Image (tube, rainbow, N blue to C red):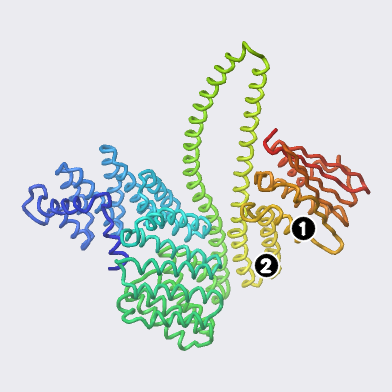
Amino acid sequence: MTKYKFLEKLRCLSFTPKKTLFLLFLLSFTVFSQKKDGDSISVLLKEYKKTKQTNLPQKAFLLAEKSKSDSILKCTYVNFGKRSFFNEDLVNLELSAKKLHQYYTKTKDTTVLAKEYYYRALYFKLQFKPDSTFYYYNKSKNISVLLKDSLEATRRLLPMAAIQYDEKDYLGSENSIIEGLRFVEPHIAKFGFKKSPYEVFFAGLLYERLGNVMFMTERQEEARKNYLKFFELQKKSPHLKIKYEKARLYNHLANTYESEGNNQKAIEYFNKSLSIDSLKYKSDYRYESALAGFSYNNFMLGNKKIALKGYLEVLKLREKRNYKRGLVISHSILGDFYKDENNIKKAIYHSKKGLEKAKEISYNRYILENLFRLSTLIKGEKGRLLLEEHFILNDSLYRRERSLKNQFAKVRYETEKKDIENDHLKEENTRKQLELEKEKQQKTIGWLLAAGSLLFIGFGASIVSSRRKKMLFDAKLQQVEVREKERQQIAKSLHDEVAGDIRMLHLRLAKTNLVEEAKSLDVIKDNVRNLSHQLSSESFDKVSFKDQIINLVSDFFEVNFRIKVQEIDSVNWQEINNAIKRTLFLSIRESIQNTKKHAAAKEITISFKETKNAVFLTILDNGNGFNIEDKKSGIGLKNMKERVEEINGIFIIESKIGEGTSIDIEIPKNGK
């Protein structure tokens, strides 16, 4: 059974097997008192699948509505909605979604609302509108989460991850995949592989997608591990012919070696795939992928005759089954091949074909590639116009990618925000109830003790005040931790996405001989990576505070610049909150950077001290010093001061020209 036939079996998942059989019986034999089999819903569905006649779904809906059976209505809307998508019938797909909404309004069946949102996502998918598609997938997923239907939630997260992947939002795609795995893996662990066939199947697909993300972000070793995990899960799925899944695995592994420049190793794996019995006839698209990869890697090794023979065979196979996406790739590869062979006529022919077919299906990557190649093959004004079109589209796509990434993040953020708000409301209500009970108890105790002594009242007030201060301090620490998570996310995004985008643009500029511009862009890329490292730091749960300080000192060590660390072991760091440690670490790093950059100091001393209620940090240098009044606008010192004061700390800086600088920081352990 193929993957697609297996997916077809997931329709009407809200019904139990017994109910489904009963409905099939009704659909086959009790079709609303009609004498002709051709008027039955089941026959109409088969006919619609075969002929794609757009009037058939409406007929089926009328028959279902006459039955006045909620179960038949629901299954009819679901089945014809799904078939409308496969038939690429936008009108009836939208109609199915509307019918499901009407059904939900009447019955308040939230599984139907989830299905409606799913079909609206498919509706926009057929129109190549990834932002709207993602939006409705997410709405459908959220309902499934509320219903605790982990399988349906995973089925929505998989295409959400695919959309993010296609739009180069690799970080977002990775997050969606991991979320999906969190839904299915606990079920597999609890019930085992045999009792979790659907979960096993989708877990395998998620690991494959995760491998693709690792592949695109140049983490090839991790990609291979995920592909092997995917294959292990597919072997446990009873619905798949595993020898053809093995070809899929070999193709993935070959691509990772190709990416690393190991063309010989890539050829070995593509050969393994091509050697699988009957692959060409039983799984043509996997055969084509293997042959295309085999040919390309031979081309890279100089075996051009083998490469051309393979390219042409792949093109014929794709023409035979009218595989549009594959035809774009084949013509583009041949255009590149003939350009390398200096066969300008054929290079132009295949590049134009690749461009034409890429535009038909909005395959932007190859639109750009073919425009650029044609601009180098066609001289004069036409070539210049093609290059201009390339740059305009490239700029537009870049802005679109950034916009879509922001939209995806916003959709997920709004969902998470609502979840957090709901959790906070529950916590707040619980806290208020506890506080009311405590206040009642305190009042009772107060009245009893008032007659005895005012001292106890004062003591009680002191406790309440202390508790309030502690609660405020804890709240501030939580805010600091939330902002830290945001900084880490921004740092990862800068490193993985922005720096990656700049690197790609750098390579393109280098290809166009814009050497100076490419060098400037390379400097910008380094600055972005430096900024990423500035924002990020290891978690104190993973690496101790002491080890991080040692690493920091090692990073800045020079023969003419000594850094002394004193009394670091006098503090019990395991008892110190991570937000406090983070503030101290950043203050030390900023001070060392400022001292090296501006103070011309030869020595800096970092001292720690702990008391019952506070942690103390002193930083001294023997540098030039400066006039503090002239440096009030310095962003580094300002940030240090704000971070310390944000958690009720005290920040004091003293400096004199020619005498160096001293910084004293005191941070309370519990906000007092």
**Residue at the image point whose x is 67% and y is 69% from the top:** 514
Q: Outermost residue toward the right?
A: 658
Depth check: give the residue in front, 334 or 531. Answer: 531
Give coordinates of residue 120: x percent, y percent: 35, 49
| Quadrant (top left, top right, bottom left, bottom right) of the N terminus | bottom left
Q: Nearer the viewer, mark 1 or mark 2?
A: 1
Does label 1 or label 2 sit earlier along the sequence?
Answer: 2
576 relative to 292 in the view: left or right = right
Residue indicated by mark 2 = 518
Which of the 4 image quadrants contains residue 208?
bottom left
Question: Vertical placement of 612 versus 248: above or below?
Answer: above
Give coordinates of residue 234: x percent, y percent: 37, 67
**Residue at the image point whose x is 30% and y is 66% from the top:** 238
Mark number, residue 524: none
Question: Vertical placement of 117 versus 647: above or below?
Answer: below
Give coordinates of residue 63: x percent, y percent: 15, 47
**Residue at the image point whose x is 16% and y is 56% from the top:** 42
224 relative to 550 in the view: left or right = left
265 relative to 604 in the view: left or right = left
Residue type at mark 1? Val
Residue indicated by mark 1 = 553
Within 10 angstroms of label 1, few (less than 14), some, or many (20 or more) residues?
A: some
Depth check: give the residue in front, 116 or 478. Answer: 478
Residue type at mark 2? Ala
Which of the 4 image quadrants contains residue 83?
bottom left
Q: Secondary structure at mark 2?
A: helix
Q: CA distance from mark 1 to mark 2?
A: 34 Å
Q: Outermost residue toward the front?
A: 452
Give coordinates of residue 416: x percent, y percent: 49, 44
Question: Vertical placement of 464 versus 490: above or below?
Answer: above
